[in-house]
């Protein structure tokens, strides 16, 4: 009886060891670290739960992200550098970040399919070939699905890597363009949720997600909401 239990336990170890060894290897080679600042102390974002794109990892160009130019076109540019947290959020990094605004019906217009929270940080001005990493802490292993809160003037595709390996293939992001909106620039601010956009099997502990912009760009990416798949 003991021999049978040991054999079953040995088989279990052999099944999980490759995954654990891969995670250890990724962890030792990757030089990025979970985002934190004076206002945000949470560290690695937790799954299940919301994973906010603007809290992509620290580490800079080529480590935590790749962007087509070194300028943050949102923080410190569109949003003037006035000393406020939201306007200057990560303003010296290449990833373009901004936040939802409710004045002048910018992000709370009648053309939203889903209204986002006010002052919600997001990654925008996306271009094909760009990517960013997010370190997450998975508290419950298993299969997950995730919704995405986003805008997309022209539609496009993204993909997600898990610990350095493609985990999703191309994911189609439906366009939120609405010809009824009389304000041209607001086409970049029609918010929607892509429900059950992706499915991942995740192991407990630290994992690194890489969000790739594949085609079209011009998307605003706010958050992924990871939920366990019901059994």
Image (tube, grey):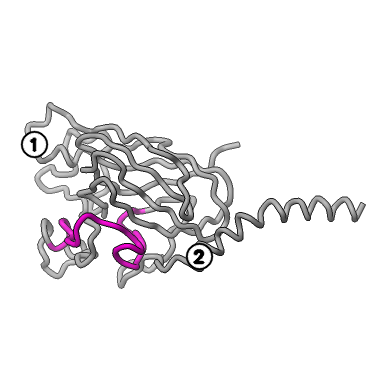
Q: Quadrant of the C terminus?
A: top right
221 lies left or right of 159: left
Q: What is the crowding at mark 2: few (fewer than 14 residues within 10 Å), some, or many (at least 20)? A: some
Assign a secondary structure to mark 1: helix
Percent of width and height locating residue 129: 29, 48
For residue 180, say whether it is visible. yes
Is 66 part of what is drawn in magenta?
A: yes
Numbered label attached to residue 184: 1
Most extreme residue toward the top is 180
Location of residue 165 with respect to 181 vertically, above or below:
below
Q: Which region is colored magenta?
A: 52-76
Q: Nearer the viewer, residue 227 or 133?
A: 133
For residue 97, say whether it is visible. no
Percent of width and height locating residue 216: 24, 39
Most extreme residue toward the bottom is 38
Which residue is drawn at the image coordinates 38% and 43% (left, top)? 159
Q: CA distance from mark 1 to mark 2?
A: 44 Å
The residue that disc 2 covers is 27
Numbered label attached to residue 208: none
């Amino acid at each position: 009886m003991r021999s049978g239990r040991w054999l079953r336990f040995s088989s279990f170890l052999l099944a999980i060891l490759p995954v654990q060894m891969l995670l250890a290897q990724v962890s030792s080679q990757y030089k990025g670290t979970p985002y934190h600042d004076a206002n945000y102390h949470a560290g690695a974002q937790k799954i299940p739960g919301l994973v906010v794109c603007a809290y992509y990892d620290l580490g800079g160009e080529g480590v935590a992200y790749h962007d087509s130019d070194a300028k943050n076109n949102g923080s410190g540019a569109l949003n003037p550098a006035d000393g406020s947290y939201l306007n200057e959020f990560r303003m010296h990094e290449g990833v373009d970040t901004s936040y939802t605004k409710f004045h002048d019906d910018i992000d709370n217009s009648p053309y939203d399919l889903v209204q986002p929270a006010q002052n919600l940080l997001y990654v925008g001005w996306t271009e094909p070939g760009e990517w960013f990493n997010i370190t997450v802490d998975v508290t419950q292993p298993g299969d997950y699905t995730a919704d995405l809160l986003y805008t997309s003037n022209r539609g496009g595709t993204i993909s997600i890597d898990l610990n350095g390996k493609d985990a999703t293939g191309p994911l189609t992001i439906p366009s939120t363009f609405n010809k009824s909106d009389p304000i041209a620039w607001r086409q970049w601010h029609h918010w929607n949720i892509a429900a059950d956009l992706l499915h991942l099997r995740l192991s407990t502990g630290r994992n690194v997600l890489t969000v790739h912009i594949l085609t079209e760009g011009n998307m605003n990416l706010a958050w992924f909401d990871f939920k366990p798949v019901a059994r």
